[in-house]
Image (cartoon, helix red, strand yellow):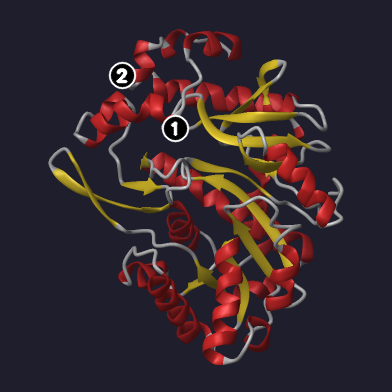
């Protein structure tokens, strides 16, 4: 963190996000113009006339909503060396899903522009510090419970490019570009390999314990179910809970619905009276994060173009009415009008929840969870 004025540093980090929330329409218009300039430099964008698109209506007519399966052939060609087919920059890495989508992993290319945008993962933590005034959090460390950012390599043209899990990639770049110092370092986690067995995870948990047991861990970042499993591992392997070792004050967690409801009792039982801040992202990008005590995330309108497919048609995310649901369609520097496969619920503006994948039974599961956790739609 800059030694001179930490408050000024936080303001500069958070200001674009907050300004975009004040005027979502303007922010989204600006994002569309930036994205179209990128798309116009790619084969896919040129084929759809990106250079001639003047606004959102023309954009929707020119570019179809597309799923990963629609993009898969083009992505495979990028991996074979036809980079300009989808990208206006060389790839610097690839993110891979954990195989939760019909059992298949998806590969998503990353560019320098894309990686700079992934630093937004730190906004949830920054907003907590700015609102609470707990600047001494940065004197401690972030207990890093993320997946590996490097699992292997793929051949792209005539070179090998690393690929890994998005949660680890986010952490690596947030640590490099913000005051948040993660322990273990992401490179240390990567060195253990990309295995997904119980033994692999116990090796990562033991690394986290050894590296952090004598540290002042004030923050925890990672995937919510993994944070719960780590707490149980500590009790089983070392006879202590995280709350016995550290005074964690805030946890920034993602990857699953219900972090502030279904997972909250277990997290606070293991880690103590922590503030929980949800991050909403996917392998394709970081689309929003919790900004305050209200238990929902707010979008990154300054970074991505965000639409939803609703029963009444496609509309902008910021146009959704409270209680309305829709399937998220995100335009990123890599993928135009990409349907993520997540079902989004609009709450009081500008708050949203991802309630699960776009299955018919997801709203029923969400309603059941709200009932059993006694949340009943509360923010």
Find residue 282 and report its horizontal and vertical position in percent: 52, 44
Q: Position of residue 214 (x, y in %)?
A: 54, 90
**Residue 203: x percent and y percent?**
40, 78
**Vertical placement of residue 187 versus 37, above or below:** below
Q: Secondary structure at mark 1?
A: loop
User: Residue at the location (52% across, 21% down)?
Assistant: 33
The foreground one among 146 and 140 is 146
* 347 over 174 or under it: above or below: above
Query: Label 1, on which residue?
Result: 333
Q: Is residue 215 visible?
A: no
Q: Residue furthest left?
A: 158
Vertical comparison of 206 with 361: above or below: below
Question: CA–CA distance between discs 2 and 1?
Answer: 14 Å
Please state if 81 lies on the left or on the right of 332 as rendered: left
Residue tagged by mark 2? 43
- Looking at the image, is 49 positioned above or below residue 122? above
Tell me what residue is drawn at x 77 percent, y 75 percent. 273
Q: Residue at x 43, y 51 (%)?
A: 98
């Amino acid at each position: 963190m800059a030694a001179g004025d930490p408050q000024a540093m936080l303001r500069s980090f958070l200001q674009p996000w907050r300004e975009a929330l004040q005027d979502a329409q303007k922010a989204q218009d600006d994002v569309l113009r930036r994205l179209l300039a990128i798309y116009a430099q790619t084969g896919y964008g040129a084929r759809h006339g990106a250079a001639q698109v003047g606004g959102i209506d023309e954009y929707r007519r020119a570019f179809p909503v597309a799923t990963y399966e629609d993009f898969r052939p083009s992505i495979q060609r990028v991996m074979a060396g036809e980079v300009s087919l989808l990208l206006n920059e060389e790839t610097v890495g690839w993110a891979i899903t954990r195989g939760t989508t019909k059992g298949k992993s998806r590969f998503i290319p990353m560019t320098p522009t894309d990686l700079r945008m992934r630093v937004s993962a730190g906004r949830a933590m920054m907003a907590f510090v700015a609102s609470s005034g707990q600047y001494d959090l940065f004197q401690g460390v972030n207990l890093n419970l993320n997946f590996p950012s490097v699992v292997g390599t793929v051949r792209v043209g005539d070179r090998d490019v690393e690929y890994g899990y998005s949660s680890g990639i986010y952490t690596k770049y947030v640590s490099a570009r913000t005051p948040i110092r993660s322990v273990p370092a992401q490179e240390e986690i990567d060195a253990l390999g990309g295995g997904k067995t119980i033994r692999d995870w116990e090796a990562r948990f033991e690394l986290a314990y050894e590296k952090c047991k004598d540290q002042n861990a004030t923050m925890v970042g990672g995937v919510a179910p993994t944070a719960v499993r780590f707490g149980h591992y500590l009790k089983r392997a070392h006879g202590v809970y995280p709350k016995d070792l550290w005074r964690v004050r805030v946890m920034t967690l993602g990857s699953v619905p219900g972090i502030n409801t279904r997972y909250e009792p277990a997290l606070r039982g293991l880690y103590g009276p922590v503030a929980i801040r949800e991050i909403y992202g996917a392998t394709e990008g970081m689309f929003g994060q919790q900004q305050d005590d209200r238990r929902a995330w707010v979008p990154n309108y300054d970074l991505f173009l965000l639409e939803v497919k609703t029963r009444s048609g496609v509309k902008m995310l910021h146009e959704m009415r409270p209680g309305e649901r829709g399937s998220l369609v995100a335009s990123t520097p890599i993928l135009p009008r990409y349907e993520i496969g997540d079902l989004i619920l609009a709450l009081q503006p500008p708050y949203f929840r991802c309630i699960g994948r776009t299955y018919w039974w997801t709203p029923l599961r969400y309603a059941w969870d709200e009932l059993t956790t006694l949340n009943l739609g509360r923010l």
